[in-house]
Amino acid sequence: MALKSVTIKLYIYSGTLGSYAATDLKYTISKDRISSKTSITVEIANLVRDYLDFTFNNNYISSTKWVTVSQTLYDSDTGLEYDEGRSPVVTNYLAFDGYGYFEDSINPQLSTAALYTSNNMYLPEGVAGKFPIFVEGVGKIIIDSATTQITDSGNSNQKIQYITIPANKSSIKVYATNDNTLLKTVTITNVCEPKYTPYKITYVNKLGAYQDLFCFKKTTESLNITDEMYKRNNINTSSLSYNLYSGQQQRQNVNGTTSIVLNTGYVKEDFNSAIEELFLSENAWILFEGNTLPVIVKSKSYTEKTVLNDKLINHTINFDFAFNKINNVR
């Protein structure tokens, strides 16, 4: 008896594990075994990613989904399903929209505790923050001396939790589930900025969680205009004359996009990882004049900064607002 082919049913859903319905069947995939191989490989990551949506309005909602894969295996001799109770094979996953780097090798295991790679966080004085964790790997969080016990209901909507950091705290300590193993320590720097207005950027980091980054220093806004021109005929055919106040050149389809250049202010070298993840993120927002607005990182290159080379480290980031200045949403 040898493997001939496989048919996969892919269920993607929210809620608790195994709570899927027929309407949650998103894909049915059939694939034959290559004659020179002894197994069948099917890549499902990009298919699942289509159903991981990020809609952020300063509300920090868990973006994970359950994925149930049902594999029905077929025998090359009989064409029937494998016997002995081996088919179908059901496997369950919890999906994040994260990624590994090339040097992490294939299918790397991302963090199962703190969903924050840097060991430093910068908050304006008097402002609370958010810290993302994966609840299956975290038992408690200690912020300064205050302890928060972490509970897991099993629902996908709370697998990523965003712990509130009260204003003017100095450290976050993350401990493992069911023991006192310290997994991560994050140092909080509370920045007093009397001159410039700090802006909060929120983006999806490499671990699939929303992460905040404050920019404290100089801000520059600019408006980039696009238009079209045409030459019009302004002759009055009755009098065979034209008005001097009527131009030959006329603009049309005028619109523009706003750009904003932000500066982080001085940060530690360890914060390079946060900046790098921002540059690689497909989803980012800015809290601007009381509204959460989508932005796109306009800068297409990033130079890693070090204390040795740069002494004091400040990151300058150029963003485009992800919409036209004149509303043409139809």
Image (cartoon, helix red, strand yellow):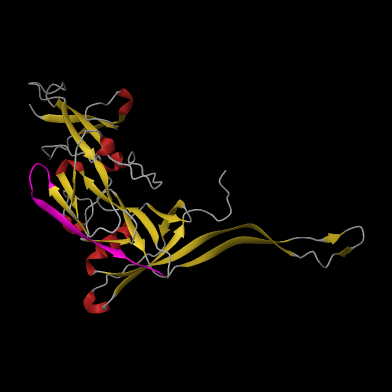
Count all numbered tags in the image, as a single digit. Answer: 0
Image position, residue 123 (x, y; %): 31, 60
Q: Residue at x 39, y 65 (%)?
A: 299
Task: Report the quarter where the C terminus lies.
Answer: top right
Residue 111, visible in the rendered structure: no
The answer to whether any part of residue 202 appears in the image is yes
Q: Is residue 252 magenta?
A: no
Q: Is residue 229 left or right of residue 30?
A: right
Is 180 in front, or is 49? 180
How far across and how far down the image is residue 278, in percent? 32, 58
Residue 290 falls left or right of residue 9: right
Residue 181 in magenta? yes
Quadrant assignment, res 217: bottom left
Q: Identify which residue is drawn at 28% across, 76% down.
A: 312
Where does residue 127 sit, x and y in percent of width and height?
A: 34, 57
> Does residue 296 sit above or below 263 in this rendering?
above
Relative placement, left or right, of 260 versus 273 is: right
Span of residues in magenta:
176-194
Which residue lies at the image location 8% right of the left edge and 48% below the top edge? 180
Above or below, 215 relative to 86: below
Image location (x, y in percent) of residue 182:
10, 52
Q: Nearer the viewer, residue 20 or 154?
A: 154
Question: Looking at the figure, which quarter contains the N terminus?
Answer: top left
Say which of 80 and 136 sits in front: 136
